């Protein structure tokens, strides 16, 4: 019995087992804590709302981003959009209160889409573009009254209203460029940027980075950004009165400058016939000073449907003769050499998409031919082929397509080769292309000037290294017990 007791006292296994169990528990605890500590938490979001008060309509956009990554790596995404019923707010100059009323339906949608606990901290912006720029030029007091009505309506909602204002053409172009490149992840990664081509109802913008432009030749067209640690010297220009709707007024003004009772318009389909008012045609500041003296109250607008003649008429709305710079686009405006890919959005997309011409792999000559064939199609046939399209939109696609092609090739100097660098876009990764996202990113400082710091290791890499280190420690621990293994291997003899 004494020998057995001595054997048990000399046997180290119970102590070894206890040490091993404690070691295993410690290692499991270490790995578990590392995994739990680095597990993604349930995501919380913040929101922003921007109203785009354009010349022809107003649209509301809701943006969302991770709450804990306000100014770092959190990606801002569009989660909802709402098109306000009725025309743009500039159309309510004679009844300003209606401008505010028109926004309420979309604002009620925003109340439902943004979580209630986030309402009070959600910034709400309204930016007005060329329609209000024109109204402000024509009637400043009417413009002020429209803004008062809009602000009064928006302040009744539970969001953090940040004001309503008119964007300059330069801002509209620059923020459109920011939006396109932000959504395409070109800014954060420091890639070659994409130029932005925006075509609205009353103005059009072109914005791009050119390596041969430093802003010295035309400082008014230069905007400098420092984003994610990179400097961008951006060329941008906005042409007021050269949006699609106002350009059509310029085109019709060319054809009615003598005050005729009838015009045969090559930019409208054969068989098109409408009676139109001279007062309505010349009610815009873009053409009001051109109204012919002694013109009748109305004129008969008839279509001819001839693309080549239409393009000749459209060219007359541009001035290609004067240029005091080394090179110009049109109307004596400086433009550096085109560079890189371009994204064309807003009316560019809607018109070209209607004609199935958004695929820029189609040669430019083939694009011209398709527009030519479409313009020559009789009006009755066009209406029969598109019964679901509103007539006021349908009647303008021939002019719209001809104008776009002329603006791009004759105005901005795209060639048969560089035309293929244009991509007609409506959305990028689920968010609408346009100035609104860039505007909000700027006002909320969501894009840092310097590149954000990032952890040295990703979550998965960190957990893997911790796990390997724990296993290595465990192996070393077992190796340290080798002397005990030898002692345990010597079986005690019972005497």
Image (cartoon, rainbow, N blue to C red):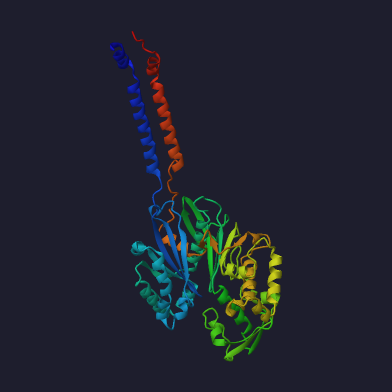
- Locate residue 100, reporting x and y percent: 40, 76
- Locate residue 38, reporting x and y percent: 40, 43
Q: Quadrant of residue 28?
A: top left
- In the image, 18 versus 256, the foreground residue is 18
Compared to residue 47, the image places residue 4 above or below, namely above
Residue at x 63% of width, y 90% of height? 261
Residue at x 60% of width, y 58% of height? 341
Extreme-top residue of the structure: 495
Q: In which quarter of the image is residue 307?
A: bottom right
- In the image, 253 versus 289, the foreground residue is 253
Left or right, 114 with respect to 428, comes to left
- Locate residue 34, reporting x and y percent: 38, 39
- Image quadrant holding the N terminus, namely top left
| Res. 422 visible in picture | yes
Compared to residue 452, the image places residue 197 above or below, namely below
Residue at x 65% of width, y 66% of height? 357
- Locate residue 65, reporting x and y percent: 42, 57
């Amino acid at each position: 019995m004494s020998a057995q007791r001595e054997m048990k006292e000399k046997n180290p296994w119970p102590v070894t087992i206890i040490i091993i169990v404690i070691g295993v528990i410690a290692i499991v605890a270490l790995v578990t804590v590392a995994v739990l500590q680095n597990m993604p938490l349930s995501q919380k979001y913040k929101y922003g709302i921007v109203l785009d008060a354009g010349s022809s309509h107003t649209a509301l956009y809701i943006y969302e981003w991770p709450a804990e990554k306000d100014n770092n790596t959190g990606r801002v995404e569009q989660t909802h959009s709402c098109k306000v019923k009725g025309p743009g707010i500039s159309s309510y100059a004679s009844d300003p209160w209606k401008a505010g009323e028109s926004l309420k339906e979309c604002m009620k949608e925003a109340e439902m889409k943004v979580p209630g606990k986030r309402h009070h901290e959600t910034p709400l912006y309204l930016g007005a573009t060329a329609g209000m720029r024109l109204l402000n030029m024509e009637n400043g007091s009417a413009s002020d009254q429209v803004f008062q009505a809009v602000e009064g309506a928006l302040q009744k909602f539970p969001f953090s209203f940040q004001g309503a204002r008119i964007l300059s053409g330069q801002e509209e172009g620059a923020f459109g460029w920011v939006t396109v490149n932000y959504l395409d992840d070109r800014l954060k990664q420091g890639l070659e940027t994409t130029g932005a081509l925006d075509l609205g109802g009353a103005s059009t913008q072109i914005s791009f980075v050119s390596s041969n432009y430093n802003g010295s030749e035309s400082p008014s067209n230069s905007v400098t950004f420092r984003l994610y640690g990179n400097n961008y010297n951006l060329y941008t220009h906005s042409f007021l009165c050269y949006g699609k709707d106002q350009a059509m007024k310029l085109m019709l003004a060319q054809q009615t400058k003598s005050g005729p009772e009838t015009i045969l318009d090559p930019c409208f389909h054969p068989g098109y016939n409408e009676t139109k008012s001279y007062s309505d045609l010349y009610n815009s500041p873009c053409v009001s000073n051109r109204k012919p003296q002694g013109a009748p109250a109305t004129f008969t607008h008839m279509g001819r449907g001839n693309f080549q003649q239409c393009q000749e008429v459209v060219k007359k709305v541009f001035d290609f003769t004067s240029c005091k710079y080394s090179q110009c686009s049109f109307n004596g405006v400086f433009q550096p050499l085109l560079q890189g890919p371009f994204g064309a959005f807003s009316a560019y997309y809607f018109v070209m998409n209607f004609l199935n011409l958004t695929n820029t792999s189609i040669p430019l000559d083939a694009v011209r031919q398709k527009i030519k064939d479409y313009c020559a199609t009789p009006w009755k046939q066009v209406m029969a082929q598109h019964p679901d399209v509103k007539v006021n939109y349908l009647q303008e696609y021939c002019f719209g397509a001809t104008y776009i092609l002329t603006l791009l090739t004759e105005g901005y100097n795209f060639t048969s080769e560089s035309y293929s660098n244009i991509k007609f876009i409506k959305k990028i990764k689920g968010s609408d292309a346009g100035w609104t996202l860039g505007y909000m990113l700027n006002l909320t400082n969501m894009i840092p000037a310097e590149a954000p710091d990032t952890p040295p290791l990703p979550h998965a890499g960190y957990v893997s290294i911790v796990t390997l280190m724990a296993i290595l420690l465990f192996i070393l621990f077992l190796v340290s017990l080798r002397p005990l293994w030898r002692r345990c291997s010597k079986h005690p003899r019972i005497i």
